Image (cartoon, grey):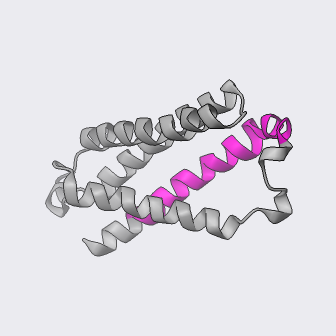
Amino acid sequence: MLKRVLVATAAVFVAWSVPDFAIHGVILRSVYAQTPALWRPMGEMKMVLMYATVLVAAACFVGIFAHLVQPKSIGAGIEYGLLFGIGTGISMGYGTYSVMPISEDMAFTWFVGSIIEAVVAGIITAIMLKPKKEQANS
């Protein structure tokens, strides 16, 4: 089980990192440019720390599913991802909007992006942590 948890963690890390690049580096690029005082210049960003936080979050996401979610079905993965995504997305998007001068579009994009990424992660995790006897029957 540990090997599958580690592989699922790596898969979730990738599943979160790729759309994050699209969301933050492409979709919201011009929106970030409107508020340069809020963000570090590209050369000063702590990207190793950012990726480390994503990896820890992915490990926690997969660990919670592995130890607390039953059954390990795709439906349970979707439900878990949706709840996780709403919880993290509302705090990331609208929690930040409540205290920082970011646009409503940015808050909404962070919120929706978090939900989509978490649901995808829930599906990936459910598939990868499906009990072995069920995998053999599929």
Depth order, front residue of 54/71: 54
Q: Position of residue 105 (x, y in %)?
A: 68, 26
Residue 13 visible in the shown view: yes
**Residues drawn in magenta:** 8-35
Residue 129 visible in the shown view: no
Looking at the image, residue 99 sits to the left or right of residue 84; the answer is: right
Q: Position of residue 123 (x, y in %)?
A: 36, 45
Q: Measured along the vertical axis of the image, is residue 69 above or below residue 80?
A: below
Q: Position of residue 23 (x, y in %)?
A: 67, 41
Is residue 26 in the magenta section? yes
Query: Which residue corresponds to the image point at 18% horizontal and 59% vertical from the top-left?
Result: 131
Q: Position of residue 41 (x, y in %)?
A: 85, 56
Looking at the image, residue 67 sits to the left or right of residue 62; the answer is: left
Depth order, front residue of 31/22: 31
Outermost residue toward the front in this view:
99
The dominant secondary structure in magenta is helix
Is residue 123 in the magenta section? no
Which quadrant of the rendered structure holds the N terminus? bottom left
